[in-house]
Image (cartoon, rainbow, N blue to C red):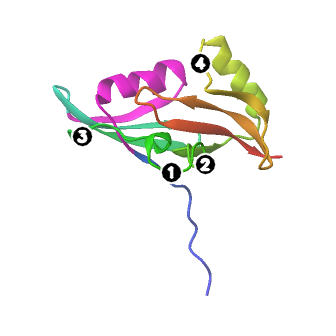
Amino acid sequence: MTQAEISGISPFFIVSHVPSSLSFYRDRLGFEITFQGPAPDDIFFGIVRRGGAQILLKDVGVAPLPNYKRNVKKGIARWDAFVNVADPDALAAEFASRNVEFSEPLKDTDDGLRGFELKDADGYVLFFGRPR
């Protein structure tokens, strides 16, 4: 039997204010807003995309809870999303030119990756990189 193709996966982040989150991803990280709504005067759900990466954002009336704030061993599960990037050096340079603050700089990690980390408007930690 031939396996059906899976073309991607999208993290779903609970956020405190969807318009602010959409602005962060668009203005700071160069994502495109592909949906916001359900109505112009009632935006509690949104979708951003850049290349093959897509993130769903929704305000459900509870505070965001990024992984690094959970009760786990310090630092062991801090990422909320891994964003596969063929050239993390070029993306880091692009983000630096926009004054994006990195929570961890571009580097080769102990677990065999090359990339960098940043926190979004709600504190979610995204790792942008690839295996070395």
Look at discs 1 and 4 and give the one toward the viewer: 1
Determine the secondary structure under disc 3: loop
Alpha carbon of mark 4 to alpha carbon of mark 3: how far? 26 Å
Mark toward the start of the polypeptide (4 vs 2): 2
Residue 84, x across and y down, in percent? 66, 45
Asked if the residue under mark 2 is in contact with the one under mark 1, i.e. CB atoms within 8 Å, the reply is yes
Alpha carbon of mark 1 to alpha carbon of mark 3: how far? 21 Å
Residue 109, x across and y down, in percent? 78, 41
Q: Amino acid at mark 1?
A: Val
Mark toward the start of the polypeptide (1 vs 4): 1
| Left-right relation of 83 to 91 | left
Determine the secondary structure under disc 1: loop
Asked if the residue under mark 4 is in contact with the one under mark 1, i.e. CB atoms within 8 Å, the reply is no
Q: Amino acid at mark 2?
A: Ile
| Stretch of the chain drawn in magenta | 13-38
Q: Is residue 67 magenta?
A: no
Q: Residues within 10 Å of mark 2 (few under 14, many from 20)?
A: few
Q: Which mark is residue 72?
A: 1
Q: Which residue is mark 3?
A: 62
Q: Give the vertical position of 92 relative to 68 (above or below).
A: above
Q: Which residue is mark 4?
A: 101
